[in-house]
Image (cartoon, grey):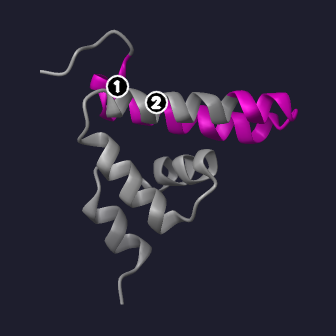
Amino acid sequence: MITLDDIEDMTCLTREEIEAVAEHEHIGIMRASILSDYLMHQHHGPQKVQQMICEDIRAALHKDDVPHAKELFNVLRHYMSDHPEAARGVSPE
């Protein structure tokens, strides 16, 4: 049986990044990992994942859930350090 660790190993994202996509899209972790991996290979896909995480942060702040917003901000920082191509204004090569 395939585990979450196996799925994470098949993508270029961390479990926390996949969980942020799952939260944003209101889908399960398995589907979010497939969607995330797909997006990471699309033109402007990394920017879309970055945008999803930012929108999750905004939603957490609107709910006054500062601890969750901080967690998501740390996810965003890690994501941006691993995937600089996700910065807005960066064109894929």
In the rendering, at what x and y percent does residue 73 appear? 60, 31
* Residue type indicated by callout 1: Ala
| In the displayed structure image, the side of residue 14 where residue 90 appears, left or right | left
Structural crowding at the residue carrying mark 2, measured as other residues with C-alpha within 10 Å and reported as few (<14), some (14–19) or many (≥20): many
Quadrant, the C terminus? top left
Q: Residue, x 56% and y 65% (percent of image)?
A: 28
| In the displayed structure image, the side of residue 86 where residue 22 appears, left or right | right
Mark 2 residue element: helix
* Residue type indicated by callout 2: Gln
Q: Residue, x 61% and y 44% (percent of image)?
A: 24
Q: Are marks 1 and 2 in contact (CB under 8 Å)?
A: yes
Q: Residue, x 36% and y 63% (percent of image)?
A: 8
Task: Residue 3: name its quadrant.
Answer: bottom left
Is the residue 6 above or below the residue 53 in the image?
below
Is the residue 63 above or below the residue 22 in the image?
above
Q: Which residues are magenta?
A: 58-87
| In the displayed structure image, the side of residue 54 where residue 80 appears, left or right | left
Ranked by sequence position, the earlier of labels 1 and 2 is: 2
Q: Residue, x 28% and y 13% (percent of image)?
A: 90
Residue to which mark 1 is pinned: 86
Q: Which mark is residue 50?
A: 2
In the rendering, at what x and y percent does residue 75 appear? 52, 39
| In the displayed structure image, the side of residue 3 where residue 61 appears, left or right | right
